[in-house]
Amino acid sequence: MIPAAFEYLAPTSVEEALAALAEHGDEAKIIAGGQSLLPVLRMRLNAPEWVIDLGRIESLRGVRDGGDHLVIGAMTTHHDVGNDPLVHEHALVVSKAITHLADAQVRHRGTFGGALSHADPAGDLGAPALALDATFVVQGPGGTRQVPATDFFVDLFETAISEDEILVEVHVPKHTGWGASYEKFVRISHQWSIVAAAATVRTEGGTIAEARIGLTNMGSTPLRARAVEEALVGRPVTEEAVAEASALATEGTSPPSDLNGDADYRRHLAQVLTRRAVLAAAG
Ligand SMILES: Cc1cc2nc3c(=O)[nH]c(=O)nc-3n(C[C@H](O)[C@H](O)[C@H](O)COP(=O)(O)OP(=O)(O)OC[C@H]3O[C@@H](n4cnc5c(N)ncnc54)[C@H](O)[C@@H]3O)c2cc1C
């Protein structure tokens, strides 16, 4: 299908983009890589009068070292984030998740900030961002504010970004030396997760010292499996100990039921995938 007609703006600075948002209000829509928005426009599920393209704002691209954290520009493509050596060294679970995200074409167009702003609970970046305690930097008419990952994801396709704001960058605390794994269950390769588990783990001499786990598609937002994290600390890296802790992965979840699987099936998957992810992450 062909989208409804719209006016197209391509600002070259965040300030220009914010001015356009302020001028056109809820008649405007931001476009980043277009990999989620374009299908929505083509199906006419949304028909904005103005589309504001962030693609020419160079300051929103790239990964840099911010000291104790990495700074990932919102318009950095999945391909560039996934292949960045800093991300690989300090936030390995993000690199791992991106290898499972869609196909090469989508990874070359879709952006880190676009996917997180879209807030699809089946998307592959929310769980790693949550597991790593990322901070989201959003900019609006009054300046920038920082939103912790726990407050960023509000509900299904809903984030803490207001209508007059733009996500500009994501700060990811360094987890240098932590092992990581992203275990994703799909029926068709490179599709959205039925369920997935993101795990990043620090071990000391065969014992789990710290663990962070995020779950994909186990509720209306990505979720942290805190009960599993707590149960893992101080436990040996054995199948038995990790399986026992991973049985707690369903705590606090409310998975959907759909054609891909009912809620009980997803609960089972969450336990299995968490166990696999933790064991792989712990080496
Ligand atoms: C065939 C296909 C398969 C896919 N498979 C997967 C998959 O397996 N896993 C997965 O996680 N994703 C998958 N995706 C989605 C992909 O990750 C998209 O890149 C992502 O969801 C949206 O990123 P985008 O940059 O294309 O954003 P866009 O589509 O341009 O925008 C998405 C939404 O976010 C808003 N937005 C974008 N950037 C900002 C910003 N900086 N500030 C505020 N709002 C913003 C837009 O207004 C829009 O509402 C798939 C997409 C396709 C087409």
Image (spheres, rainbow, N blue to C red):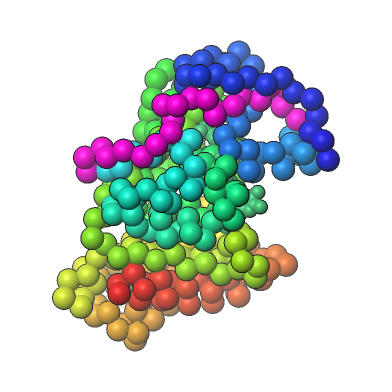
Which part of the image, by quadrant, shows the N terminus?
A: top right
Residue drawn at (75%, 30%), measured in percent from left and top?
47
Instruction: Name above or below for residue 203 compared with residue 25.
Output: below
How far across and down, in percent of the image, does residue 155 sit?
56, 46
Q: Quadrant of ligand 1?
A: top right
Residue 67 belongs to the span the image colors magenta = yes
Report whether 129 appears left or right of 54.
left
The residue positioned farthest toward the left in the image shown: 205
The residue positioned farthest toward the bottom in the image shown: 240
How far across and down, in percent of the image, does residue 102 sit?
58, 56
How far across and down, in percent of the image, does residue 70 sit?
30, 42
How far across and down, in percent of the image, does residue 146 sit?
36, 33
What segment is highlighted magenta in the picture? 47-68
Residue drawn at (66%, 25%), measured in percent from left and top?
51
Can residue 255 be seen in the rendering of this structure? Answer: no
Q: Between residues 269 and 5, which one lies in front from this camera angle?
A: 5
